[in-house]
Image: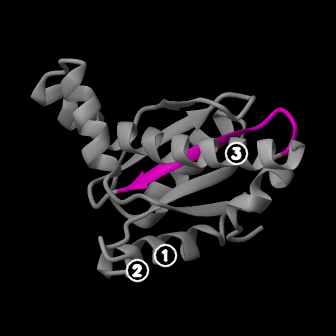
């Protein structure tokens, strides 16, 4: 498959599959998964980054175990909407990853996702150490939830 628009995603997710959300950091890859109804995002464990081959192998194993049919990956845009070095790095990772996996991929604007995830963990009184260990997966859940909410609004608009 390839990179697709969010409006195409629902039709491309096989029945009985879920959607995964990824927050691609420099040290870790945060992972979240949806429920089968594609309504709720839940954080999963993260992958400690090393080399691309090891990262991709770990990611493929997790996505297969979770029965993932598509991926939503956070696109780290600058606050003005432009793409900087981190966005280019994300695109390069996905370009290489697409050689190994045929799942459709949607890029999703991740501006302020880490900030929002951290605020929600602070409100939940999660300790600083635990926040550091969980922030990327929480950000992945925040990214995925945004995409799932958009899918829901598309579904509602089509039903009207």
Crowding at dot 2, Cα within 10 Å, few <14 / some 14-19 / many 20+, comes out as some
Please give the label number shown on residue 153: 3
Q: CA distance from mark 1 to mark 2?
A: 5 Å
Q: Secondary structure at mark 3?
A: helix
Residue 46 lies in the magenta stretch: no
In this rendering, the answer to whether 40 lies above or below 151 is above
Do labels 1 and 2 touch, CB within 8 Å? yes
Q: Residue at x 47, y 48 (%)?
A: 143
In this rendering, the answer to whether 40 lies above or below 72 is above
Q: Residue at x 18, y 27 (%)?
A: 122
Q: Residue at x 65, y 34 (%)?
A: 65
Q: CA distance from mark 3 to mark 1?
A: 27 Å
- The residue lying furthest to the top in this view is 125
Query: Which residue is tagged 1?
Result: 91
Prevailing secondary structure class for the magenta stretch in the rendered image: strand
Do labels 3 and 2 touch, CB within 8 Å? no
Q: Quadrant of residue 55?
A: bottom left
In this rendering, the answer to whether 15 lies above or below 82 is above
Q: Residue at x 41, y 33 (%)?
A: 45
Region of the chain picked out in magenta, as a range: 14-24
Crowding at dot 3, Cα within 10 Å, few <14 / some 14-19 / many 20+, comes out as few
Query: Which residue is tagged 2?
Result: 88
Q: Secondary structure at mark 2?
A: helix
Nearer the observer, 134 or 5: 5
Q: Quadrant of residue 15?
A: top right
Q: Position of residue 129 (x, y in %)?
A: 13, 29
Nearer the observer, 111 or 91: 111
Q: Position of residue 141 (x, y in %)?
A: 46, 38
Q: Quadrant of residue 96?
A: bottom right
């Amino acid at each position: 498959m390839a990179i697709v628009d969010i409006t195409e995603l629902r039709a491309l997710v096989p029945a009985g599959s879920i959607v995964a959300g990824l927050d691609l950091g420099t040290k870790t890859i945060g992972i979240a998964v949806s429920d089968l109804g594609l309504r709720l995002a839940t954080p999963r464990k993260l992958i400690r980054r090393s080399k691309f081959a090891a990262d991709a192998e770990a990611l493929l194993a997790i996505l297969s175990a979770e029965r993932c049919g598509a991926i939503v990956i956070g696109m780290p845009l600058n606050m003005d909407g432009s793409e900087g070095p981190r966005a280019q790095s994300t695109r390069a990772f996905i370009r290489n990853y697409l050689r190994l996996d045929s799942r459709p991929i949607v890029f999703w604007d991740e501006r302020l996702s880490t900030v929002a995830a951290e605020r929600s963990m602070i409100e939940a009184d999660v300790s600083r150490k635990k926040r550091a260990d969980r922030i990327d997966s929480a950000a992945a859940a925040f990214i995925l939830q945004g995409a799932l909410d958009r899918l829901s609004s598309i579904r509602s608009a089509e039903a009207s």
